[in-house]
Image: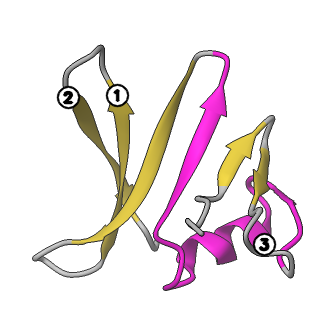
Amino acid sequence: MAQRIPYVAAGVLHCSDHSDLPAMALDTPAWWSWLDDPTTRSFVFHDPAGTFTACKEQRQRGGDYWTALRRHGLCGGWCEHCGCATS
C-alpha cells in the first residue's frame, strides 16, 4: 500500500500513516521538532488560497532546504525556495 504524505489543513498537521504521532498545531515546539526530524522529507499544505507540496532537500553547500512545489496548469509546475531547514 502506498504511503500517504502528511498534510496541513486549517493550521494543523495530520500524519495519517503515523498513528503514534498526534495531529499538531503549526508554529509550536512539536511542529518545529517535526520539521527538523531527519525522517521528515515532505508534506502537503492545503489552504483556500491554494495547495503546495513542501520538500526538504540536501544542497551542495550543505544543510537542508525547504522548497515549495505547486502544479501550474496542465503542464509542469514551479519551484520556490522556502529557506534553510534549521536556524
Label 3 and label 1: CA atoms lie apart by: 29 Å
Residue 41 is marked as none
Q: Which residue is mark 2?
A: 76
Element under disc 2: loop
How many other residues sit within 10 Å of disc 1, few (<14), some (14-19) or many (≥20)? few
**Residue 87: image location, x then y, percent:** 46, 71
Residue at the image position 67 percent from the left and 17 percent from the top:
48
Q: Which residue is mark 1?
A: 71
The disc, 3 or 1, on the residue closer to the chain's N-terminal end is 3
Q: Amino acid at mark 1?
A: Arg
Image vertical order of residue 41 relative to residue 50, above or below: below
Residue 5 sits inside the magenta stretch: no
Left or right, 84 with respect to 25, comes to: left
Residue 33 sits inside the magenta stretch: yes
Residue 30 is marked as 3
How many other residues sit within 10 Å of disc 3, few (<14), some (14-19) or many (≥20)? few
Image vertical order of residue 53 relative to residue 27, above or below: above
Q: Please state the extent of the stretch shown in magenta in the rendering.
A: 21-48
